Image (cartoon, helix red, strand yellow):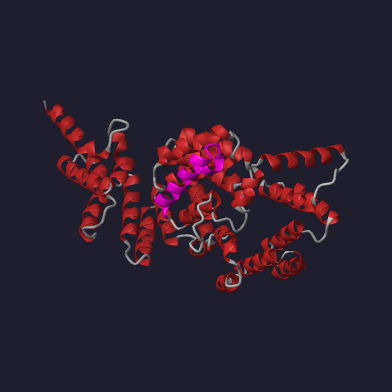
């Protein structure tokens, strides 16, 4: 679904059309509506998960005009979504005579879906050589949008820069989303801010800005932007999700849970919302509730869901905390066929074994994970942190000492955990040493790991002086 479609679906014109159609359906006396308009209504229903309503609208459109461009495009993309490329080409052939440009775009889209991106690009380049100068901007905009919609952001950018001085909001929007996809977040944010200046009541632009700010780790700003979008439309799922994500990253799990619940109430079949409800509940220590939410996430997730590994991982954590280690290990085993970081999951397996008083098995799992990772420092660190988390502070302390001798001078992670280890073992001088290292090398980690030792809202840069003053006052 293109951004252009989404813009149209928010317009007064479309809302009037939709009301007219739905009123006539309810009355049982269908008024005449253009076939292409019915295709737009079907697209709208499809976007909102109303597949039965979409099918009815498109069937009516094809009855009215079997050769209309909109319904043919809808059926072609329906075939593409099911992987039936030959059927999609049949629909494309119907478009050849009625709309040569839509035929071209559909040909390119079929090639993209087949994984023939270079061939699609060549097809568009050949046509680009034949168009007049006044057609350039429209053509590169359409092609750029097509590549962007398939998350081929490099290609989208290549086409967008062929534009001849297009400063329109449509073009800015294309560039803003493309730059976001290319992880050029500052440039993307600048363009979304410009778009918001022109369209201050656009919930999509506010939500998009919130997502950019989230990727920049500006979580408070992201929440504020999402709240502007929510004020415009309290039931806009994307802005509700953006606020929930920001609150989650700020570790405000109670409030984040409420917003994830609000999101799932609108889109119950999206496993992402249920997964993160479970994650919030785990962080709140409400493991039995977490299991119920995560099991529901597993039920609604499709077999190819990219979130399945994370659902299994969170279920493993929840069952571990619920003192059901065999179920926890069962869900770790379930990840073996998934596309995920299997070494990372083996570290979690070791953690579960350690948490359930099976240290010898855990040690073997940790050793294998470290070897399989090629002695990755990150894997080593996660194993040591797991030992600390499971109450083996003395052993973790000695392993941390060896680890930091092994790590190079540019290494930034783990110093906060070592400081915490020294704090628990009453090693005051070493605690201050590693605390200083932590705030210098990785202040974000210091805030996350050590923040509960300090007044709420205190910056990591103030940690060392605060502790020194506190220790000095205790000696008096």
Viewer can see residue 322: no
Give the image quarter of residue 443.
top left
The question of residue 187 being in magenta is answered with: yes
Tell me where the magenta segment starts and ends, as one range.
184-207
Kindly give the residue lying farthest to the top in the view shown. 476
- Point out residue 185 in the picture as x, y percentages from the top left corner: 42, 51
Where is residue 133? Give x, y as percent.
57, 65
In the image, residue 329 above or below residue 229:
below
Image position of 308 with respect to 237: above or below: below
What residue lies at 42% left-to-right and 61% top-to-bottom?
343
Of 258 and 418, nearer the camera is 258
Most common SS among magenta residues: helix
Task: Name the residue located 55 percent from the left edge and 59 percent from the top edge.
Answer: 148
Q: Quadrant of the C terminus?
A: top left
Res 220 visible: yes
346 on left or right of 388: right
Measured along the vertical axis of the image, is residue 12 above or below residue 89?
above
In the image: residue 294, left or right of residue 14 = left
Question: Is 420 on the left or on the right of 53, as rendered?
Answer: left
Residue drawn at point x = 72 percent, y = 69 percent? 89
Q: Is residue 151 magenta?
A: no
Query: Could you say which is closer to the camera, residue 380 or residue 258?
Result: 258
- The residue most toward the right is 29
Q: Is residue 431 left or right of residue 53?
A: left
Number of marks drawn: 0
Nearest the camera: 153 or 65?
65
Where's residue 38, x and y in %?
77, 50
Residue 441 on image: x %, y %: 24, 49
């Amino acid at each position: 679904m293109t951004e252009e479609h989404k813009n149209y679906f928010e317009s007064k014109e479309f809302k009037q059309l939709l009301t007219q159609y739905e009123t006539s359906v309810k009355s049982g006396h269908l008024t005449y509506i253009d076939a292409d308009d019915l295709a737009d209504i079907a697209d709208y229903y499809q976007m909102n998960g109303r597949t039965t309503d979409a099918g009815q609208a498109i069937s009516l459109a094809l009855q009215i005009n079997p050769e209309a461009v909109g319904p043919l495009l809808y059926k072609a993309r329906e075939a593409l979504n099911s992987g039936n490329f030959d059927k999609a080409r049949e629909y494309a052939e119907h478009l050849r005579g009625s709309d040569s440009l839509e035929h071209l775009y559909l040909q390119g889209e079929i090639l993209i879906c087949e994984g023939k991106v270079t061939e699609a690009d060549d097809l568009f380049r050949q046509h680009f050589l034949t168009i007049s100068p006044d057609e350039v901007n429209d053509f590169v905009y359409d092609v750029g949008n097509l590549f962007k919609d398939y998350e081929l952001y490099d290609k989208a950018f290549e086409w967008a820069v062929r534009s001849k001085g297009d400063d329109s909001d449509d073009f800015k929007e294309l560039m803003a989303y493309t730059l976001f996809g290319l992880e050029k977040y500052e440039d993307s944010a600048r363009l979304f801010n410009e778009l918001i200046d022109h369209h201050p009541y656009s919930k999509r632009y506010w939500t998009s800005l919130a997502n950019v700010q989230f990727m920049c780790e500006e979580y408070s700003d992201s929440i504020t932007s999402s709240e502007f979008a929510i004020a415009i439309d309290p039931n806009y799922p994307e802005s509700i999700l953006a606020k929930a994500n920001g609150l989650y990253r700020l570790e405000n799990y109670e409030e984040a849970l409420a917003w994830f619940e609000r999101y799932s109430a609108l889109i119950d079949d999206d496993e992402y919302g249920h997964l993160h409800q479970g994650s919030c509940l785990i962080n709140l220590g409400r493991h039995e509730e977490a299991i119920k939410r995560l099991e529901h996430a597993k039920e609604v997730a499709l077999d190819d869901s990219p979130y399945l590994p994370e659902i299994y991982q969170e279920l493993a954590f929840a069952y571990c905390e619920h003192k059901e280690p065999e179920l926890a290990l069962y869900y770790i085993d379930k990840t073996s066929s998934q596309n995920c970081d299997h070494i990372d999951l083996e570290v979690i397996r070791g953690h579960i074994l350690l948490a359930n008083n099976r240290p010898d098995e855990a040690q073997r799992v940790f050793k294998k994970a470290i070897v399989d990772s090629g002695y990755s420092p990150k894997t080593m660190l996660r194993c040591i942190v797991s030992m600390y988390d499971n109450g083996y502070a003395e052993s973790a302390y000695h392993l941390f000492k060896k680890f930091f001798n092994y790590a190079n001078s540019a290494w930034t992670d783990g110093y906060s955990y070592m400081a915490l280890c020294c704090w628990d073992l009453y090693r005051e001088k070493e605690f201050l040493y590693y605390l200083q290292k932590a705030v210098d090398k990785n202040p974000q980690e210091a805030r996350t790991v050590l923040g509960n030792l300090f007044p709420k809202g205190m910056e990591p840069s103030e940690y060392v002086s605060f502790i020194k003053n506190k220790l000095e006052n205790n000696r008096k």
